[in-house]
Amino acid sequence: MVDGYLLDKADAARQSTRNEVIRTWSRRSTILPQFVGLTFGVYNGQKFIPVNVTEEMVGHKFGEFSPTRNFHGHSGAGDKKVAK
């Protein structure tokens, strides 16, 4: 499943000589072989994360390469110093 406008933008980027970032909000779209070598700005709800598409990414979704949450680690016993 790929949004139609994304295919049009990718074709236009292939035709132009400029290396520009293609901004997209479609995290659900599947990465196709036509997208290899292009850079997409995938929106994560706050900003656009640049994703350079490689061969290994074909078949995955854009959302997999643009995390929406930041993990800061678990709190608890690891944070305390143990006195002996």
Image (cartoon, rainbow, N blue to C red):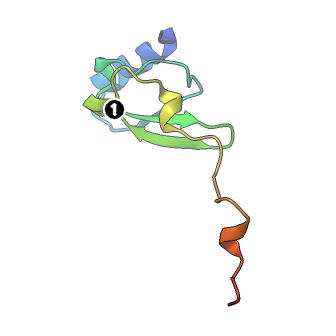
Looking at the rendered structure, the kind of residue marked 1 is Leu
Residue 63 x/y as whole percent = 53, 30
Q: What residue is shown at x 28% (from left), y 19% (from top)?
A: 33
Residue 42 x/y as whole percent = 53, 34
Q: What residue is shown at x 65% (from left), y 70% (from top)?
A: 78
Question: Which image quadrant: the C terminus?
Answer: bottom right
Q: What residue is shown at x 43% (from left), y 39% (from top)?
A: 51
Most extreme residue toward the bottom is: 84
Nearest the viewer among 16 and 14 is 14
Residue 56 x/y as whole percent = 29, 31
How many numbered marks are there? 1
Nearest the viewer among 37 and 59 is 59
- Specify whether 58 is left or right of 22: left
Nearest the viewer among 67 and 34 is 67
Reply above or below: 81 against 17.
below
Q: Which residue is mark 1?
A: 38
Q: Is residue 52 visible?
A: yes
Which secondary structure lies at badge 1? loop
Q: What residue is shown at x 55% (from left), y 20% (from top)?
A: 28
Q: Is residue 23 visible?
A: no
Image quarter of residue 46: top right
- Specify whether 72 is left or right of 52: right
Residue 15 x/y as whole percent = 28, 22
Image quarter of residue 68: top right
Most extreme residue toward the front is: 84
Reply above or below: 63 against 51.
above
Tell me the crowding category of disc 1: few under 14, some 14 to 19, or many 20 or more residues within 10 angstroms, Cα based: some
